[in-house]
Image (tube, grey):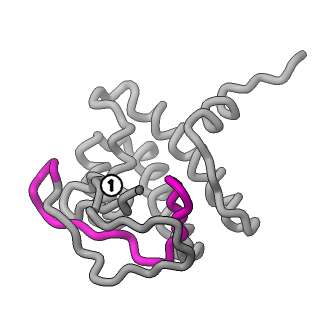
Amino acid sequence: MPFLPTFCDTCGAIFPSGVFFENVINATPSDNLSGPCPKCGAMGHIPEGTYNVINKTIELLNDPEKSVDELNKLATILRNSQVKGLGIDEIRQQVHQEVPELTSILELLPKTHPHVYQNINIILFIITIIISLTLAGHQPAITTQDIINNFYYKPAS
């Protein structure tokens, strides 16, 4: 029985909400406040939308345009940070201000400056794939292994 995820409003951490569904289609939870966050103690929100929960799989049937807009904002922030040579703290602050629901993605960035931009390129690559699939009418169900396989795939000569 999977718990719906909660995204902390303060630090962006993702944690179990305590709200669960089992084998339901088109469930729309209300009162989406949950917490406290195990990382910072603040409250968070379960993403609004309609959920399908089958076995241990949770599918959020959300407005794809909203998701695409949020991902585009994040991509713009990340691209601009590369151009301006921003540090990790400045990047985190800007993402937290403009798209706080995606702050947890920045956990993928290392603390050291030389490697930040390499990881930003990987995140931008993943965002591009997700946006492309969403705009094509597919619900992206991408695993980490799929991303690694496609990112590092080199065609035979």
Which residue shows up at 29% across the image and 56% down it?
16
Is 126 in front, or is 146?
146
Q: Is residue 30 above or below residue 94?
A: below
Which residue shows up at 28% across the image and 62% down it?
17
Which residue in the rendered view is the most extreme toward the left? 41
Q: Amino acid at mark 1?
A: Thr
Percent of width and height locating residue 58? 50, 60
Instruction: Please indicate whether residue 42 sits to the left or right of residue 102 in the image.
Output: left
Instruction: Please indicate whether residue 116 sits to the left or right of residue 156 in the image.
Output: left
Which residue in the rendered view is the most extreme toward the right? 157
Percent of width and height locating residue 5? 35, 60
**Rendering quarter of residue 147:** top right
Q: Which residues are magenta?
A: 38-60
**Rendering quarter of residue 111:** top left
Residue wearing tag 1: 103
- Is residue 50 part of the magenta span, yes or no? yes
Instruction: Please indicate whether residue 115 sits to the left or right of residue 87 in the image.
Output: right
Q: Is residue 74 above or below residue 30?
A: above
Q: Is residue 69 above or below residue 18?
A: below
- Is residue 34 part of the magenta span, yes or no? no
Q: Tell me the crowding category of disc 1: few under 14, some 14 to 19, or many 20 or more residues within 10 angstroms, Cα based.
A: many
